[in-house]
Image (cartoon, helix red, strand yellow):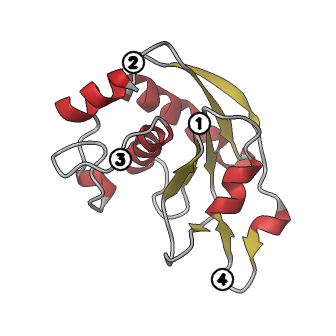
Amino acid sequence: MKKTMIRLYWQQACAAEADAVSRALEEAFPALTFRAAAALEPAPEALDTSRGQYDAAWLLRQIPEPFAIWLIAEDITYAGYDFVYGAALDQKAVVSSARTGPGAVLNREACHELGHLLGLEHCEGPCLMSPSLPRAQNPAHLCPACTAALRVL
């Protein structure tokens, strides 16, 4: 895989978690380069007031550039789900700490969504890309098949 730069945005409420998430991303994807971008706050229009959650699809459109991941503190949802920990679409990803808190689960969720941002699908083996929950049970690394798929993307 060629060297790709991933930008990391964060909501101000997640500023303290941004460094740990960045380190986890670097460990899981050593072939990539990561750069802190800027603080970014969710637009009020993205809030579904009836549910008290932000629409992840709306938030993904708010990210200003491709190859970017956004860490937010707000609870998020996606069409057809009561809630999601993160979402990725069109080379952009958003990850919420609302249900994970800081730490290993948040870091793994960010890595999982970055895998989707890079084109990886869910994996059935013991892999970072496994859809099983809770995310804390997933390894913090890609399986050999996903690693090979990443190299050819």
Q: Which residue is mark 3?
A: 121
Residue type beneath disc 3: Glu
Foreground mark, 3 or 2, reads 3
What residue sits 60% from the left and 32% below the top?
67
Q: Which residue is mark 4?
A: 51
Residue type beneath disc 1: Ala
x%, y% of residue 76? 59, 66
What residue sits 66% from the left and 26% below the top?
36
Q: Do the residues bearing badges 2 and 1 touch, measured as CB atoms within 8 Å?
A: no
Q: Earlier in the sequence, mark 4 or mark 3?
A: 4
Q: Which residue is mark 2?
A: 30
Of helix, strand and loop, which one carries label 2? loop
Of helix, strand and loop, which one carries label 3? loop
**Quarter of the rendering occupied by the N terminus:** top left
Which mark, residue 18?
Answer: 1
CA separation in Å, label 2 and label 4: 38 Å
